[in-house]
Each structure stands twice: as structure tokens, then as C-alpha cells.
Amino acid sequence: MREITVGNLTKGMRYCIKGNIHTPIIGKVYDIKGEMDYSPTWGEQISILESSMNNDLAETDIRGQKYILCKLFPKHVQRMYETLDNPYLALKEGNVKDVATKWIEKFNDTYDKHKAYIDLARYSITDKLIEKIIKYYHEDVDKAVDVVKNHPYDLTIIRGIGWKTADDIALQNGADPYGIDRIETCIKMFLRNQGENGKSFSYSEEIMQELIDKIGEEVPDLNIAEAIHDLQDSQMIVWNKEKTKIGLKWYYDLEYSIAEHLVRLKNAPNKFKYSNWLEIIKKKEKAQGWDYTEQQLEGIKMVLDNQLCCISGYGGTA
């Protein structure tokens, strides 16, 4: 047997190693000293003389690197990885210039956002929410701050920001509790939520109850009437034909468009030809081991004969 050094090994080759390593851990690097041996079964292999774990983390061991940094800098790890490609290696190699340059770049890129954090701190808005608002306004920090301070109800157009968040900000800004903007936003948010739950129109009594629940029983009727008038003028809402229900025009237009397409499909020429469908069904029933009910057969025939069908029922019954 001959003693092995790094110089005796070929880079990129796989080697069979024989011996004991105390509790080996997958992904860790080990320093091994050994002798080249030969086995009739395995061929050339290295017999371990000494072994120890290399405590230097590999460049690819990102998980291990993050673990170490979390222990050393628990409050700053996330920011470090947002700023540097590999903060562990930058610190380990003492590349102060690289670290400083990246931090300066990060500071300059986010300086305007820091001003927004300061300006909006009194509203108890989280940094994450501020980031979302700034992103919605295409990184225009001044615009985002202006909306929060002067037009907080406009925030409800941003997905994830609801009535309560916008209303809390507005009231902190000194908004009139019975102001037109507040009433309009309450109505729009109610109708939007109803629409998202499959109800595109709501009775006026339901809207009144929502206003009482959210704003209070003292909300003036004149203000409600003005708010509804403004929403109509801006084409935000529509009445049904009987003037008993109100819905968002967006949902009305969407349903109207769907109805147009359904009518077009229904009236389109049917060029589909078929024959011997019952024979085909019988073969299918025999192959699957059970028969269709009369109702199911009627449904199949209806689909074959019509351009447009509506099939409803419990899951698995159609």
C-alpha cells in the first residue's frame, strides 16, 4: 500500500473509500489521509488512516452559511442577503470594499423609501404594506406618500388593502366621519365584496345596513343620496331595471359580456355530426362495468344536439 496525498489523486474522479468516519454528515467536507489499497471486488480504494471534518463551509453550502450568520447577526441576515450576493464569503474573505460598496448602493437605491417609512410611520403602517403601496405606484415614492396622506380611500384599489386599513388612515388624517368620500368607499367595498362572493347586485336595504354597521346610525340621508348620485355619475354603479338593487358597473359589464358570448355560441351553426351514439355508449358501459342512468343519457344526448348546454348537479353526478 502507498500513502495518498492530494497530488496523487485525479481531479473529477470518483474514489471508493474504506474505513470509519465518525457520524458522517451529508453535505459536509472531510479531510482524509489514507493509503491506496486494492480489493478483488471493488478494485482500487483508499483505506482511511485519519479523518476529520473540515469546518470551513463550502461555497455551495448556503444553508450552513446562513445558519452561521443568523447566529452572529440575527437581526441583519435578511438585509445582508438582499444587498450582497454572498455575505458569508464577503465577510470571511475580508472584502471590506465589496461590502461597503454594496451597502452604499443599497442605501442610495432605497433612500426615497426610507423617507416614506418616516413620513408614514404615524399611521402604524407596516414596512411590507408601504412597499406594496410604493410598488403599485411604480416606485413613485412621492405619489405613494401623497395618496396615503391626502387620498387614503384610493388605497382600496390595491389588492390586499381593505376598508378598515384605508378608513383608519383617513380618520387619522381628520376625515369627516360622515363625509361623501367615506360613504362612497364603504358602498364600493361592500358591493365589491358581494361580487367576489357571487352576488353582483344588492338590495338598497342591505347597503343601508352596511353603512350603519361601518359608519353609524347617524349617517345623514342627504349624504348617502349624494354619494350614490356621485357613484352613478362616475359610472361606478348601476341599478337593476326595477330600481331595487345596486351593483358595480364592472360586474354588470362582465356579466353582459358573458351573456353576449353565450348567445353567440347558442345561435352559431351546429356542424357537428354523429351517429350510432347509443351503440358507442353501450360499449363504454360494458368497458367501465356500470350503466348510465336515464337522466345521464339525456344529458349526453343534449350535449350532442346543442351548441350550448348548462349541466348542474353535485360533484361527480354530471
Image: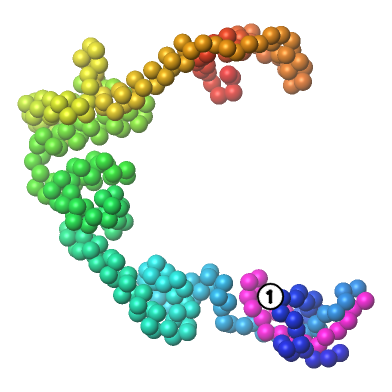
The picture places residue 122, in percent across and down from the top left corner, at 17, 58
Q: Residue at x 64, y 8 (%)?
A: 294
Q: Quadrant of the C terminus?
A: top right
Residue 24 lies in magenta, yes or no?
yes
Q: Can residue 306 be seen in this view?
A: yes
Q: In this figure, what is the number of numbered marks?
A: 1
The picture places residue 152, in percent across and down from the top left corner, at 18, 46
- What's the magenta region? 21-40
Quarter location, residue 207: top left
Left-right relation of 61 to 164: right
Which residue corresponds to mark 1? 24
The picture places residue 155, in percent across and down from the top left corner, at 23, 45
Q: Which residue is drawn at 42% across and 19% down?
A: 261
Vertical position of residue 301 compared to residue 172: above or below: above
Q: Is residue 295 visible?
A: no
Q: In this orientation, which residue lies closer to the viewer: 233 or 50?
A: 233
Q: Residue at x 23, y 22 (%)?
A: 238
